[in-house]
Amino acid sequence: MMNAQVAWGRVPRHVLLIASLWSSPLVAQGRLLRASDNDTLPAKPPTARLAYGPDSLQFGELRLPDGAGPFPIAIVIHGGCWVSRFATLRNSAAVSDALRDAGIATWNIEYRRADSPGGGWPNTFLDAARATDQLRAIARSYPLDLSRVVAIGHSAGGHLAMWLAAADRVPAGSAIARRDPLPLVGAVALAGIADLTEFRTYSRFTCGDVVDGLMGGSPEQVPERYAAGAPRQLFPLRVPHVQIVGTEDRVLPAAAREAHRAAATAAGSPFALVVVEGAGHHELLSPRSATWPAVLAEVRRLLTPAVATPDR
């Protein structure tokens, strides 16, 4: 059973959705999913594996639905605390495949993390940007609808998905500013990190002290980097973004998700918050968990063109 509480404003949309966690063998055993559980989920092979740069980590897996297209596109970004030991794009293969089965083309990207050669500031950001903009070239060979592109990312990947949606808000002089970014219609963060400064105060309990490694320093040392790379500091976003999180999530606990909602509301960012009762961090990336209907619904909502209404 799901109960939804909805509050509407002139610009933002705020949603609190409470869902009961589906029973599963893992839940019955009394534990939540781990990242490694999602690595073992079945996924059909991609349509193509394509490079977006010369580095061995600059590639993505393109999955196309059946049919002629052109298809809307979800850029899928795995998490892993911006370091290589926690996750690869295998972690997001199952959700990419499930979105493809739902009629949405997926571009599941790999990227250089903070501990990869050449990764960290600014290249972790620029890899996400280059992969996104590479869709223009990919669309010359595959039936993609570049007017309907959404970014969806888990955890650290959620941070990058929101950052991609904020492309036009990044200061022009920043090392991660983009001259001609591919426009998105929105972003879905699956327990995504919106506030890097806040996250570094408690990341040691889950990821370790990873934020300074990503940014090349603390907020006091390199404030201009945090101003350009933290989604919360780029509010209001031009396009809607959604935060989906479980009540048992330790990476994005209740205080952090409420701070995200308050900041988006105050800035006037079009925003929705979806909270799934009983779900942890890694359920969000599993199409077999109770979070999946909410994830699919929000991706579809963002990809559905708005219907203009006449002025009254």
Image (cartoon, helix red, strand yellow):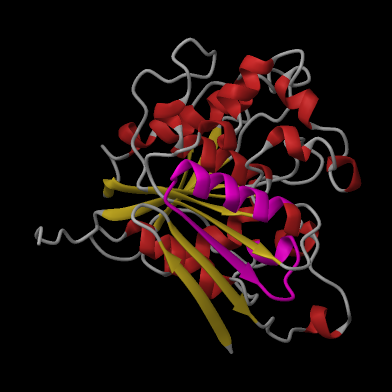
Quadrant occupied by the N terminus: bottom right
Question: Residue 269 in the image: x percent, y percent?
Answer: 44, 45
Q: Is residue 258 magenta?
A: yes
Position in image of residue 48 (x %, y %) = 45, 46
Q: Nearer the viewer, residue 166 or 262?
A: 262
Residue 124 falls in image quadrant: top right
Q: Which percent across, then down, holds residue 154?
A: 63, 51
Report whether residue 115 is seen.
Answer: no
172 is higher (above) or lower (below) than 130: above
Q: What residue is at 41 percent from the left and 54 percent from the top?
A: 12
User: In this rendering, is residue 173 above or below 7?
Assistant: above
Q: Residue furthest bottom?
A: 1
- Indicate whether 300 appears above or below 171: below
Left or right of 149, for residue 140: left
Indicate the position of residue 238 as horizontal and vertical percent values: 37, 39
Tell me which residue sits at (53%, 42%) in the image: 161
User: For the point 79% across and 45% down, which residue is it?
Assistant: 86
Q: Relative to residue 187, is residue 22 drawn left or right?
A: right
Q: How many labels, in total?
A: 0
Magenta part of the chain: 256-284
Please indicate whether residue 177 sits to the left or right of residue 250 in the image.
left
The answer to which image quadrant residue 217 occupies is top right
Name the residue furthest top: 173
Q: Is residue 271 visible?
A: yes
Q: Is residue 248 magenta?
A: no
Q: Is residue 103 above or below residue 183?
A: below
Quarter of the image where the C terminus is located? bottom left
Residue at 48%, 23% (x, y): give it: 170
